[in-house]
């Protein structure tokens, strides 16, 4: 996304200069250089991440209710060299955090369910929910404590298809586990479907400040922009009446 903007600015600048609009072309090329440096050297991603992740810097203190649900959002799956399907690299921190919360909940003596949400978005032949659940069972989670939501292909569907499972279970507290960059959008979508959540981050993304532009910073910028666009699109769709009707919190 950020590289697309840079390319457009460069092409616009070259075209303007070719048409003898040298000042306009110079401005476009200058903006391209500034954007390239601000992104690649870490200033722009640092600013974007600060607002996106800031509210989730501290993990919340949790007062367990009689019936608790820990919702683990998928982060991709991949087929390994031996043909087996396993969680993608970004998923492991989410799995570990969800497992830690599950163990803490079980130790409290309260009711606990661990819901895994994710379909076969990467077309591996197995939904993420099934793949992650197998890993969690090997790590000690009781099969009876697992709730699987294997249909969702995106965050909106994570929320939409999880809501009935959580209502049927009668969850009184819902912990939403995902990456810090993802929690603002995910919490917003779950709230739309009547699920009030306590967001818990599984990982923390950092820019790399450097005098020399780093490719990592462009990837981080694109990821952050994807989240901001998702939040903005939600509000635009709501204003236009394109979203499904919102569900009141606690409604069946």
Image (cartoon, rainbow, N blue to C red):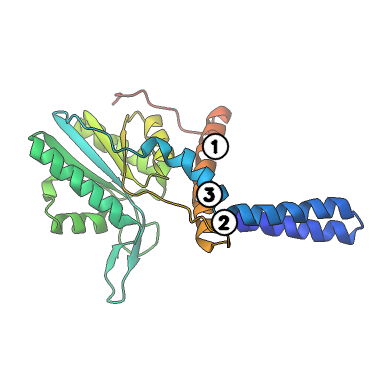
Picture quarter with the N terminus? bottom right
Cα distance, mark 1 to mark 2? 26 Å
Q: Quadrant of the C terminus?
A: top left
Q: Position of residue 243 (x, y in %)?
A: 49, 33
Where is residue 79, by image quadrant? bottom left
Q: Label 2: which residue? A: 41
Crowding at label 2, few (<14), some or many (≥20) Cα neighbours within 10 Å? many
Quarter-wise, where is residue 172 in the image? top left
Residue 219 in sight here: yes
Q: Is residue 83 left or right of residue 181?
A: left
43 relative to 166 in the view: left or right: right
In this rendering, which labeled residue sits more in front, label 1 or label 3?
Answer: 3
How much space separates mark 1 and mark 3, taking CA atoms? 18 Å
The residue beneath circle 1 is: 232
Residue 84 sits above or below residue 146 on the image: below
Secondary structure under tag 1 reads helix
In percent of the image, x 87 and y 51: which residue is there? 23
In the rendered view, does 229 fall on the left or right side of 68? Answer: right
* Of the image marks 1 and 3, the number of the one nearer the N terminus: 3
Which callout, 1 or 2, points at the residue further toward the start of the chain? 2
Report the residue marked by disc 3.
45
């Amino acid at each position: 996304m950020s590289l697309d903007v840079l390319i457009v600015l460069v092409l616009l600048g070259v075209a303007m200069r070719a048409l003898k609009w040298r000042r306009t072309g110079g401005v476009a090329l200058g903006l391209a250089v500034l954007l390239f440096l601000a992104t690649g050297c870490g200033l722009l991603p640092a600013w974007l991440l600060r607002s996106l992740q800031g509210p989730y810097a501290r993990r919340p203190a949790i007062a367990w209710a009689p019936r608790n649900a820990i919702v683990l959002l998928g982060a991709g799956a991949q087929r390994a060299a031996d043909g087996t399907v396993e969680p993608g690299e970004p998923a492991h921190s989410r799995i570990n955090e969800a497992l830690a919360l599950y163990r803490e909940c079980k130790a409290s003596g309260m009711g606990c369910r661990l819901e895994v949400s994710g379909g076969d978005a990467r077309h591996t032949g197995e939904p993420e929910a099934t793949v992650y659940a197998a890993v969690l069972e090997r790590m000690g989670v009781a099969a009876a404590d697992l709730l699987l939501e294997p249909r969702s292909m995106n965050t909106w569907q994570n929320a939409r298809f999880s809501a009935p499972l959580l209502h049927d279970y009668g969850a009184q507290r819902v912990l939403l586990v995902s990456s810090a960059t993802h929690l603002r959008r995910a919490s917003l979508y779950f709230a739309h479907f009547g699920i009030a959540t306590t967001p818990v981050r599984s990982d923390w993304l950092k820019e790399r400040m450097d005098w020399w532009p780093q490719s990592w910073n462009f990837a981080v910028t694109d990821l952050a922009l994807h989240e901001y666009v998702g939040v903005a699109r939600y509000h635009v769709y709501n204003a236009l009446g394109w979203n499904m009707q919102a569900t009141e919190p606690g409604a069946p």
